[in-house]
Image: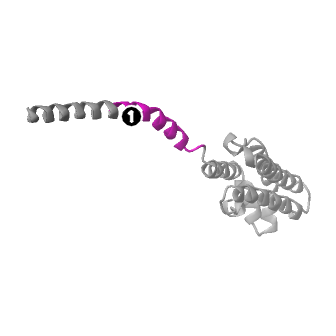
Amino acid sequence: MKKFWILLSAITFAIGLTACSAEKEKEAEPEKKETEEAAKPEANPKSAMYKFYMSVVNAINEADADLSAYEGEEDPKAQAELKAAASASAAAVASNVEGLEVPAELKDQKADLEAAIKDIAASYNAKAEELKKDAPNMEAADATFAQGEEKLGAAFESVGMNKPVLSKEL
């Protein structure tokens, strides 16, 4: 008889444990879903910043071939021949850069990035205007570009990234 009671107690105990563990699993499921949602990373600002930076580089590089050829030419006669095409190239770059939009993921850096875009576009517009002159002077345009590059660097630093050197990418 003792064996029967021990066996009955063991079965009752096993059923009780099974029932309790099933209840705990049901309770744990909503918590698990909540923690999974909380663990999902929000938009990665570093990734968005890098993609935006590459869009700036691409916007410049797709239209600056004639301007780069002009700036790389050392022969004054050859430069004179390239001037008109370089001016059009600089204006096209400015237009491309002005058309860029700051991604929503970078809302905290939007002011810096928009200011950087504005300065970079202004520098290319200034180059386009200077190239229409007989003796173009690019110092002011280069200074404006450096300001834009500095603002871009500040935005990068705000998300924990190193400042890029945009002029090396061009």
Residue 159, percent from left and from top: 67, 55
Q: Is residue 29 above or below residue 117?
A: above
Q: Is residue 14 left or right of residue 112?
A: left
Q: Residue furthest front?
A: 1
Residue drawn 71% across the image and 51% down it: 60
Residue drawn 9% across the image and 35% down it: 3
Please, what is the dominant secondary structure of the magenta stretch?
A: helix
Q: Residue furthest bottom?
A: 74
The residue closer to the viewer here, 35 or 83, is 35
Tell me where the magenta segment starts and ends, as one range.
Answer: 22-42
SS state under label 1: helix
Q: Is residue 28 magenta?
A: yes
Question: Residue 96's quadrant in the figure?
Answer: top right
What's the amino acid at mark 1? Lys
Residue 160, percent from left and from top: 66, 59
Question: Is any part of residue 40 visible from this angle?
Answer: no
Q: Mark 1 highlights which residue? A: 24
Residue 81, percent from left and from top: 79, 58
